Amino acid sequence: MCDKLTAVNNHLISQIKSVISENIDLNRDINDDEIRDMVIKTVFDFFRNDYIGIAEKKELVDAVFNSMRRFDILQPVIEDKTITEIMVNGPDNIFIEREGRISSLNVKFESCEKLEDVIQAIVSKTNRAVNESSPIVDARLTDGSRVNVVLKPIALNGPIMTIRKFPENPMTIEQLVEIGSLTGEVAEFLYCLVKARYNIFICGGTGSGKTTFLNALSGFIPRDERIITIEDSAELQINSVDNIVKMETRNANTEGKGQITIRDLIRTSLRMRPERIIVGEVRGAEAIDMLQAMNTGHDGSLSTGHANSAQDMMSRLETMILSAAPLPLDAIRRQIATAIDIVIHLSRLRDKSRRVLEISEIDGCRDGNIRLNPLFLFNEDGETPEGMVIGCLKRTKNCMLHTGKFIMANVSYNLGGEKNKGSK
């Protein structure tokens, strides 16, 4: 849109909406086509005596229609497939992430009330509620994008909304190899681990690519298995398995009733004959239920968690379990060590690239500590003149110690010259 239109965009939209409301009863049931036709007619009438180009008129029509029926100024941003994150810090400050870089948008909502209307439109579609008495909510868009909302009085600088977008076609392990997140050798090893039903835990910081990596690993699960996915807000896009059950938590209603937690869903999933259970992310007391599921015949399960390293993830799991049950620390550590086989640590490096930094197997619990046996570690070799990190995962000198599941599944692997035939 031309500079003049951009400068008065919100004012123009308000004027055009006022004209439309005078000519049509917006309270009756009107379909989108009827609204769009009215918007087009009004825009063309509005500029009958002032010339603006067809492209500018179309942009204004879209802006008015989005304001009336969709998500206002966020609609084109949501539709932009190159944008991975949208951060709304009140009505006047909107930031986006594209290709790992954060930048601000030169647009704003016409008012705080309009932003709140958009938030309510998004949240209501997922049968959730957000208001001053319950000011925090997680929801999702119809395309699977994750939405987090925080309202006043918790959010001091206005309504806050963060939208994490996901690609239509989730990345595969092959694509992760192409962009340098891991090597072909590692990808082949991960395939063998999933096929042999090793329990794998993926950890990393916010935005490190845990969900993307979990999706990619899930692509290795045999199509004929039965999978149960459990998430706070549905994000996983597993298309490689036919027999899949997807479950999502539910917040309590306005009366404080009806809440369904991850713990509830994990317990329910055990009665649904799962072969593998995938928990999108563990944050608290549900960790004990997840580990018990892994320890009771549901090998090959996958999950993720926030942590700064593989060893730090072990400590965080200890804390999560302690919050659920006052068990002796030694018992907790033994349970973690027997439930999880492999820990994969991801990180977002200084050049904004997402890499696998460590793949370790858990080698039991000794001297009161969970022992990790690193199999691959990221080795940095410098950086390009443009500041891009040069490096890749390198095989350590450590042999894999627990190969029993490979043998039971008759799966062969070749790990840097260390071979396993799959059977004795």
Image (cartoon, helix red, strand yellow):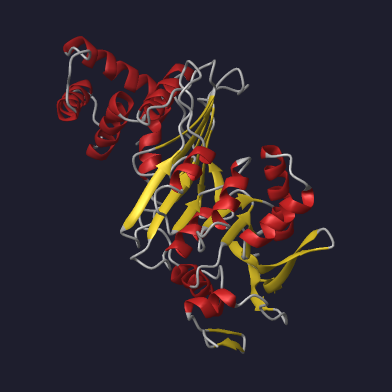
Q: Residue at x 71, y 79 (%)?
A: 396
Q: Is residue 384 visible?
A: no
Q: Nearer the viewer, residue 403 or 395?
A: 403
- Residue most extreme to the top: 22
| 173 sits to left or right of 326 | left
Coordinates of residue 413 in the picture (x, y in percent): 53, 83
Vertical placement of residue 264 versus 420, above or below: above
Which quadrant is home to the C terminus? bottom right
Q: Residue at x 58, y 88 (%)?
A: 419
Q: Residue at x 45, y 17 (%)?
A: 113
Q: Nearer the viewer, residue 239 or 140?
A: 239
Q: Is residue 164 visible?
A: yes
The quarter of the displayed image where residue 150 is located: top right
Coordinates of residue 201 in the picture (x, y in percent): 59, 59
Vertical placement of residue 228 versus 418, above or below: above
Vertical placement of residue 418 versus 97, above or below: below
Q: Residue at x 31, y 16 (%)?
A: 15
Q: Nearer the viewer, residue 330 or 303?
A: 330
- Residue most extreme to the right: 367
